[in-house]
Every structure is written in structure tokens, then in C-alpha cells.
Image (cartoon, helix red, strand yellow):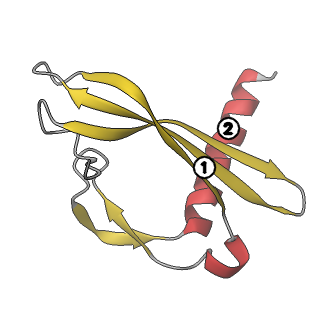
Amino acid sequence: MTTQYDASVVGGLRVRASRLIIETAPDVPPVVHIEQTTAVTMNDHSSQQLQPFPTISQTLDLATNGDTPIPLVDFVTGAPLGGTTTLNSVMLQLLAVVRQLQLANNP
């Protein structure tokens, strides 16, 4: 199967990221685990998960690759959006959201 990610194609078999886990620890680069499934987009544009697809596990080397430009893409279609971001920026923003949720939920 040629890997396909476009969720806008009705009836098209694609790979879907179903869970994202980021392990963080002091003085150790973060590790990301992307759990995947195959899925199909139904006529009503809902998504039906079918079967597991191999998990991707990768150490995020922020010191070496943190400022490397990453092209922005549409999450549904994968089409280029024309801008870039960096891993350092994404991690900073994600961890800010995590802290906001912690403060809101841990009085």
C-alpha cells in the first residue's frame, strides 16, 4: 500500500495518527511515539479506524535540529500551507498548553 494521509478522500484508505505520546525527562532529549492506524473516510466525512499500523518512535534532538525549518501542511490533506515552523517553537508552544491545562485542573 502506498502510504496515503489525505482524510478528505471519501472511501480512500489512509494512515491516521491515533495517539501522540511525548516522553520528557530532565537532561534527556524528548522521545515521541506516534501510534497509527489505517482508516477510511466515510460518506458522512467521519473516520472509521480499521487496523493498527506500525508505531513511529523518534528521539527529538532539539539541540541539533530544533531550529531546522519544518514546512507547515494542512492536517487533513497534507497540502503545503506556505510557512514554516521549528521543533523548538512547537515544543515551547505545546508545553505552554500543557502547563495551562495543569494549572486549570490541579488547583
Q: Out of 65 and 41, give the one closest to the viewer.
A: 41
Q: Residue at x 13, y 18 (%)?
A: 44
Q: Using residue 102 as the reference point, say whether residue 3 is left or right of it.
A: left
Q: Residue at x 13, y 38 (%)?
A: 9
Residue where numbered disc 1 is placed: 94
Label 1 Cα crowd, 10 Å radius (few <14 / some 14-19 / many 20+) = few
Q: Using residue 70 as the reference point, say whether residue 61 is left or right of it.
A: right
Q: Secondary structure at mark 2?
A: helix
> Tag 1 or tag 2, which sits nearer the N-term?
1
Q: Out of 86 and 3, give the one closest to the viewer.
A: 3
Residue 70, image x, y percentages: 44, 71
Q: Out of 67 and 107, give the one closest to the viewer.
A: 67
Q: Out of 12 and 89, give the one closest to the viewer.
A: 12
Q: Residue at x 50, y 43 (%)?
A: 54
Residue where numbered disc 2 is placed: 100
Q: Amino acid at mark 1?
A: Leu
How many marks do you count on the picture?
2
Give the position of the C terminus as an image quadrant: top right
Q: In the rendered image of this protein, does residue 89 appear above or below residue 51?
A: below
Residue 105, image x, y percentages: 72, 22
Find residue 103 and report its image quarter: top right
Q: Using residue 62 as the reference point, say whether residue 25 is left or right of it.
A: right
* Front label number (2 vs 1): 1
Residue 93, image x, y percentages: 59, 54
Residue 21, image x, y percentages: 64, 41
Q: Residue at x 34, y 24 (%)?
A: 50
Q: Amino acid at mark 2?
A: Gln
Q: Which disc number belongs to residue 79?
A: none
Discs 2, 1 touching: Cβ within 8 Å: no
